[in-house]
Image: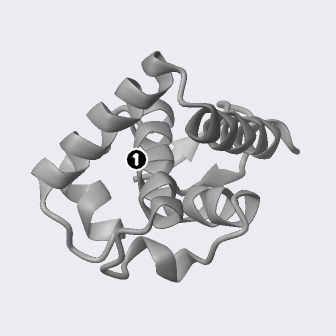
Amino acid sequence: MRLPISRTQQVIKKPMDMLRIIANTLQMSVENYIERNRTREVVDLRFVSAKLLRHYYPNITYKQIGALYGGQDHTSIMNAIGKANDLLYAGDKSFTQKYHAALNSIEQWINEP
């Protein structure tokens, strides 16, 4: 799955590139996506990135996202996106800050030449 930013722009932005940017923004490692760890930091990383992947790559499937996370089941990805939405709606301060930091980094990445 690739995200062409514009018809005239030759740069192709890939989902794995986005995952790297999100991990860097949250001061995490890309290995955190695939490790079987349920600490709050790792879970938030997965929730934020799953939600942003579905937003910026609307044609990516839950199964494809799960593959990026080391083979997680599609229902785990659906649950992650639902939990991300719940945390944002509830105004969870920690999660909301992480989400907006990642969102800002992704917006900068998309708009860079």
Please identify the quadrant where the C terminus is shown: top right
Please provide percent x and percent y for residue 112: 86, 43
Q: Quadrant of residue 94?
A: top right
Is residue 32 shown above or below 53?
below
Q: Residue at x 45, y 19 (%)?
A: 90
Q: Residue at x 77, y 44 (%)?
A: 105
Residue at 39% from the left image edge and 53% from the top image edge: 1
Q: Which residue is mark 1?
A: 50
Estimate how packed mark 1 is, as few (under 14), some (14 to 19) or many (20 or more) residues with alpha carbons within 10 Å: many
Question: x, y (%) of residue 89?
Answer: 45, 17
Front-most of residues 42 and 77? 42
Foreground: 58 or 47? 47
Q: Nearer the viewer, residue 54 or 7?
A: 54
In the rendered image, residue 58, in percent from the top left (x then y), is placed at: 37, 32
**Residue 96 appears in the figure:** yes
Instruction: Give the residue displayed 20% in from the left and 67% down from the top.
Output: 72
How is colour applied across the structure in the image?
Answer: one colour
Element marked by disc 1: helix
Circle count: 1
Above-or-below relation of 110 to 22: above
Whole-percent x, y for residue 44 in the image: 48, 52
Q: In the figure, is residue 86 to the left or right of 3?
A: left
Left/right of residue 22 with respect to residue 80 in the rendered view: right
Q: Amino acid at mark 1?
A: Ala
Q: Is residue 61 visible?
A: no
Q: Looking at this view, name the residue that lies furthest to the top.
A: 89
Task: Please tell me in which quadrant of the rendered image residue 36 appears.
Answer: bottom left
